[in-house]
Amino acid sequence: MSFLQPMMLAAMPLVALPLIIHLINQRRYQTMRWAAMMFLLAANRMSRGYARLRQWLIMLFRMLAIAGLIFAVSRPLASGWLGMTSGGRADTTILLFDRSPSMQQQGAGTAISKLETGRNQLVQGLKTLGSSHWVLIESTTNKPRSLESPDALFNLPDTEPASMAADLPAMLRVAYDYIKANQTGRTEIWICSDLRENDWKATSGQWRTLRDRFMQLPQGVRFHLLAYPQTADNIAVRVTGVQRREIGQAAELLLSLKFIRQGNSNVPATIPVQIEMEGARSEMTVEITGPQYEMKDCRIPLESGQKRGWGRIAIPADSNPADNVFYFAFDQPSTRQTIVVADDPQAAEFLQLAASIGPDPSIACAAEIVPREQLAAVAWDRIALLLWEATLPEGEVAERIESYVHRGGQVIFLPPRIPDSKTQFGMRWEKWIDAPKDSSVEAWRGDHGLLAHTQSGAALPVGQLQIHQYCHFSGKFTSLATMQGGIPLLARVPANPGGIYFCATTPAARDSSLATSGVVFYVAIQRALADGSAVLANARQLVAGPVPAGIPAPWTRLSSTGNALSTDYSYHHGVYAAGDRLLAVNRALEEDHACVLDDAAIEELFQGLDFARVDDHAGNVRALIQEVWRLFLFGMLVAMIVEAALCLPKIRTAARVAYREVQGAAA
Amino acid sequence: MFPDYRSRSFLDPQALSRLASIPLTARRPMQGTISGRHPSPHRGASVEFAEYRKYVPGDDLRRMDWRAYGRSDRYYVKEFEADTNLRCCLVLDTSGSMAFGSGNFRKIDYARKIAGTLSYLAVQQGDAVGLTCVAKGIVQSIPPRQNPAHLMHVFDILEQAVPAGETQIVPVLHELAETIPQRALIIILSDFFAEPDEVRGALEHLRFRKHDVTAFHLLDPLELAFHFRRPMRFVDMEGGPAIFAEPNEIAGRYHKALEQYLAKIQDVVLRTAIDYHRLSIDEDYERALMRFLTGRTQTRGVR
């Protein structure tokens, strides 16, 4: 049981008042000379069972009446939020509000989403509980925002649905920073979320740090989780590939679609898929089976003159309307430009060759060998990939490369023949080492990155590579491939949104078989080139989130279903125009998978913290927190009435009977 | 009538004058010593014809009914009812319990009023009055007499009676049943705090001796209501052990015991056919006596 005025419970010892009065009364007895002792003696000999029980019941009901009164003035709450407010009114209440697409899932038999239900519950609950200060941290911007009252949640656009996935650890970090910076006093953090794994990132190392930090806060923080873990049958649609292709005089759009199905996936389902191309709609029927279903290169005819455009895919409404629409944009592919900076002419030639041959005839690629002294003249905003086989850059060149990576460019560093001790991007070349004979790659990441498996699922022949010499590098990196003994061969340096890779050897014949067994190296370079060129493309598929670097503002909405603020376009799905670019913003892939954290995982995340959780369901219109002091007041009245009934009638009746007999005899 | 008249607290002249208009009668024939107004079991010389009886030698020839002889040629003696006076024996319980009174009167005071008034009424109509004060045994006893001087003696004893000691009314009643020689009106004034079965035995003993028994059962209103708010320590007025009781707890059982007792007493009354009057001492004694006297006139004893 929780109370709004828990201090009133300090009066609970008053429950013993009837007992104390009884004991005092026992001591205040009167002495009386009495004649009819024979009746008293007879009464003492009689069974006292009921009489004694009656006395105890009277005492009990008196105590219950007082307890009911104390409970009533303590303002008890009837809810599942057991123990949540026992600390009384908070100085600051911070709301962490999950606006991710999965929160738009609707409950069974209702059109109210989890997000709307959670918002209503929070408003009602927080209004009941009260606080001195309310702060909202929603899942898109992760910026704290003060609220005048919980009612403001209804009016703020910050609590409307968004397409961006939530990052609960980041939100908690912001909450911690806010508490630390503002000395918030007694603080409560309320989290409203559907417990999706991709939002909570339960395996992230940040949770441990967050737990330690919150536990070190002197004022103590209470966590309340309003969870909506229920999942429902749902189908999500997304576009995995968009490619414009010209066939003779005609043109067509190759769309790859993916359907992800939750719930009963064994039963085949026929779905009408609506394709909208700049306002023109067409429909096709797709029969899907299994939990996932993909359609590759579905051909959509285009007018021959249409070089660029946008569209959207829609399926009929189901439990989650947020994943029934997917936007896309397309444009004529631009030339993928690579510059090669190499001290070794042989390596430079090979690198240029690998980067200049496109994987598809329709994709134009160009690679240019640029001397270091001419780098200042390079048009960096058109470069997709930089291949660097020389000593690490420094000074102005290093700054340019850093800026280039920041806007999404890709760099692959290869070891120079004579490594120096310079450190750049947190990395440093060490020295060349002769590899043991027939040294090969022992392990590599096949799930993602440059060496990932092909679309058909086949692994690249990375294990067939022979390494003769390698140059060890040191720094902070993530290995993508390692040789025997765990020596890194290819590594990625943390950098967003671009990519910085370090390869421990060169394609030169004396160093490795990268050139002779060129598939692996070619694929890696083309993948890096594709990543780099995707950023430069005029039509981009963006995952909802902050505006990526290099994209001009403002954005103009071309198609969208929501009423998002123009400053928040990047958080909402739709097609937008930014300058001459077309931007299709959609939810992240992880949002389509209804993987929910189990209870044990949640408990583990908040282990050691003052944490309470209640599960709600979408469409619940009953307030989770209700004041029930009336119930206790009624209980008190009932107790008093029962006590009175036990006290009075028995004695009066008996006395009246005896007295009436005498009067009757007299008459 | 009373040359050495002095005021008695238990006598109200106005009440006496009002009650004097109703005669005190016996419900059954009495054996008095002199002629009176009460029926006697014997034949006498009153004007009320009783029966004819065959003449036997030795009968008074003056009682021979010659007209009957003329009609039937047989000798008959004409007999008439005898009227005698009443011998009223007052039995006053003076045990400690009679000192109880929650109002203006104690039970002993109430009993004094009844006893004094009845004594006066009896003597006034020529009946004899005796008084026996009982507690653990017979405390004081004077035989029935009919003269006014004796009545003053009765008043004195009533006035001086002090309630004390245990109630042993049952053995005393047995004793009185044996010691009162002739049929008499026995009026018992007591709270009868004794086992009803024992009381029944004593009353049956008195009835066996052909006494006309009347019982005034005196109870205090507080004894009936047992209405207390605070815990009480009840000290026995007759010297028994004290009892500590929570009235709210014990009241129910007290009333139950009281009801059982009264029901048994009522059963005793029905079985022994005594003239029983249960009185709460907050009731006007004059009304109680009026009820007693008028009741007796309706059930005047047959011979």
Image (cartoon, rainbow, N blue to C red):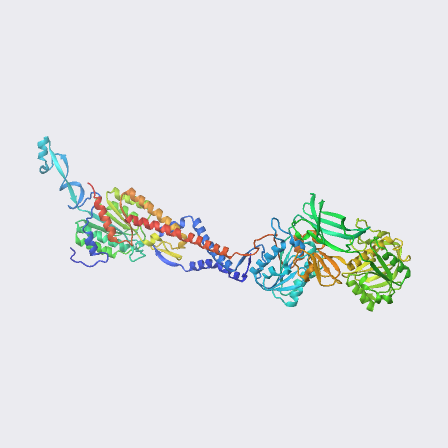
Name which residue lies at 37% across and 50% down: A653
Q: Position of residue A488 (x, y in %)?
A: 83, 58
Task: Name the foreground residue: A346 vs A176.
Answer: A346
Q: Position of residue A642 (x, y in %)?
A: 44, 52
Where the N terminus of chain A falls, by quadrant? bottom right
Residue A469 visible in the snapshot = no
Residue B143 in the image: above or below residue A551: above
Relative placement, left or right, of A308 versus B271 is right
Relative placement, left or right, of A137 versus A498 is left
Residue furthest to the bottom in view is A395
Q: Position of residue A455 (x, y in %)?
A: 79, 50
Report which quarter residue A117 is drawn in.
bottom right
Task: Name the foreground residue: B173 vs A229.
Answer: A229
Residue A213 in the image: above or below residue A620: below
Report which quarter residue B233 is drawn in.
bottom left
Figure label count: 0
Residue A255 visible in the snapshot = yes
Q: Position of residue A605 (x, y in %)?
A: 67, 57
Task: Name the foreground residue: A63 vs A168.
Answer: A168
